[in-house]
Amino acid sequence: MADAKVIPFGEEPRARRKARRAGRTGRGTALAPVPEARTEHPPAAPPPPSPRSLEERIAGGLAFLRRRITGDYEVDDFGYDEELTDQVLMSLLRPLYEKYFRVEVKGVENIPADGGALIVANHSGTLPLDGLMLQVAVHDNHPAQRHLRLLAADLVFVLPVINELARKAGHTLACAEDAQRLLERGEIVGVMPEGFKGIGKPFADRYKLQRFGRGGFVSTALKAGVPIVPCSIVGAEEIYPMIGNAKTLARVLGLPYFPVTPTFPWLGPLGAVPLPTKWTIQFGEPILTDGYPSEAADDPMLMFNLTDQVRETIQHTLYKLLVQRRSVFF
Amino acid sequence: MGKVVLVTGVARQLGGRFVRRIQRDPDVDRVIGVDAVAPEHHLGGAEFLKADIRHPAIARVLAETGVDTVIHMDINGTPLGKRGGRTSVKETNVIGTMQLLGACQKAPNVQRLVIKSSTSVYGSAPRDPAVFTETTTPKSLPSGGFAKDVVEVEGYVRGFARRRPDVAVCVLRFANILGPCADSPLAEYFSLPVLPTVLGYDPRLQFVHEDDAIEVLRIAAAAPRRGTLNSGTFNIAGDGVLLLSQTSRRLGRPTLPLFLPTVTWAGTALRSIGITDFSPEQIRLLTHGRVVETTQMRETLGFHPKFTTAETFAEFARSRGPGLLPPESLARTVDRLAGVLPARGGLTQ
């Protein structure tokens, strides 16, 4: 494994850790299913247990179809279409989440059951699949089935089709105004402060957190008084190992980077298939912000300290998870 | 103490309705309607003065009638009827406002000025925040057309407010006004049998009902009620948001998604043969959409719209008659399918 430059933080010997991991995977599979939500999904959903539920599902699907074609559904101010997200978009992502990347989620209890929270995660993988998987992870594992509202780069909202889907899936532009509005409404907001620096970094720099923007997310969380939940995602770095960056081509296309991987663009669309890595998403202890006075958001020193604290937490958790990981693919 | 109200732009439907409404207010003595052309609808007994606000004559009107409240509604995106093109509209918007404000500055009686502005001042761009507040500075200012007129008009109004601090100035930024008799370009667009849309974009839209528009203008024109303040800038929109795809489904009109360059080109072509006024800023609105925050309207101005965005649109859809794919018949088809598909039946929702 190439992620060997890691110094193990070992609180316990490797053998015991391995044993514990076995236990955890066992528990992980027990924790994974969310079939209650799935029973009312359109017929596309897997095994039909009994004819009665199949009928129900057809009826549910038709009722859904009826609402969709008559325009009888609601979207919020951001264009978030909860029904479409739950019934269609999530169902499309779930196979990728469960079968392809086999995402293992830890520490989901660190996300509050109600009220706002800001999830801060590392960003990687050339294409923002980590954000989408994080969204499924929060929704499917959280007991309250909370919806994650991601903050996305402005590039997302410039591209046709992508912008439409992003808005409907509940994403919005990464700016302080939108983030604060969502947090004040008690939503869970996800942000990846590394931005393009993180997602477009070369393969050699994997799992090295980049600069966290200007730390605007901390002041937004402070203003809204919501906890910051650090989140570390392992596995997304290796889905597209970016060995080069065609800068000229990127500039011509107006993109922040143009990835060159061992397979892309050489194999064409086939080269754009991500590698089936095994993912782990770990939510860390929330960092509470409601204890600070209201003027704290204007204190740059406090902002830098909190930003560093969040960043260090994510980086250390990344190292820990890497040490525990057996292989990139299993 | 009676009030003398001057209303500009009364030849339009909305102006006419507002004059008729305010005429009935007990504390309004006299209403003077002003426009460059005589209105086709009656004004409910209000006086009509045929005057072009682009000419200095408007100052004389203000001085002679002793007007104390000016409602400036003659800020529009499209020419009235078939007369004049974009140039004359722009002149009325910008030069007309300058002249009117100049006249107001010289008229010592004027105590209150209400401007019917538009949320177009925010433009529509993908890099803007999802929801605009009154203080948001747009990332890209509108480059032309009606939106730029509105930006300039608001600039002049701010200048006027500085020079005459004794005048209460209220700028109402309306979202798209819809209603049974609204004659806005968007209403015209929704009347097309097939709605051309931009491929890959589903804009968020907000609407205000005509009745609400009249009501909020009346609140702004009167003395502020207890605990409210009616000078300043306010976004006016119904609650909630509709996506363009939703509006087309609720109207029962199919959409025709086109590539963005094609839409721009088709808009120009249609405009030049005069079928519809599909201006570039209209296309921007139908590409990126626009949503505004209305907390100020509720909490400071104390206005609570009667119609939500969805209700406004439903009302409008009723007044337009069914489209090619009426939602009721689509729903019936699905219901029938639901009745037929499972052989045991009894599964209609």
Image (cartoon, rainbow, N blue to C red):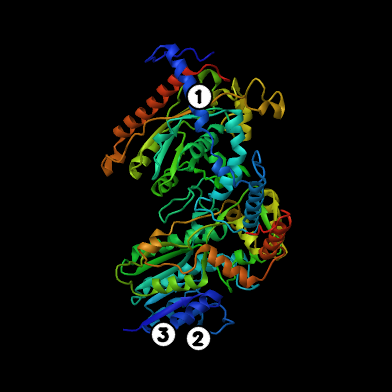
The quadrant holding residue A245 is top right
Q: Residue at x 39, y 71 (%)?
A: B220
* Horizontal side, residue B339 vs residue A74: left or right: right
- Chain for numbered disc 1: A
Q: Secondary structure at mark 3?
A: strand
Q: CA distance from mark 1 to mark 3?
A: 81 Å
Provide the residue designation for mark 1.
A25
| Local secondary structure at mark 1 | helix
Same chain for labels 1 and 3? Say yes or no: no
Tell me the residue that label 2 is attached to.
Answer: B44
Horizontal side of residue A287 vs B193, given as left or right? left
SS state under label 2: loop
Residue B149 in the figure: left or right of residue B3: right
Report the quarter where the C terminus of chain B lies. bottom right
In the rendered image, residue B238, in percent from the top left (x then y), is placed at 48, 63
Dot 3 corresponds to which residue? Answer: B30
Asked whether the viewer can see residue B106, the reply is yes
Q: Residues within 10 Å of mark 3 (few under 14, many from 20)?
A: some
Q: Are marks 1 and 2 in contact (CB under 8 Å)?
A: no
Say what amino acid the circle numbered 3 marks. Answer: Arg
* Depth check, front residue: A175 or B320: B320
Q: CA distance from mark 2 to mark 3?
A: 12 Å
Q: Relative to A323, does residue B97 appear above or below in the rendering?
A: below
Quarter the N terminus of chain B occupies:
bottom left
- For the point 63% across and 44% down, the residue is A161
Q: Position of residue B110 (x, y in %)?
A: 36, 75
Label 3 chain ID: B
Q: Where's residue B144, x and y in %?
A: 56, 56
Q: How many C-alpha atoms fall within 10 Å of the one at disc 1: few (<14), some, or many (≥20)?
A: few
Chain for numbered disc 2? B
Q: How many marks?
A: 3
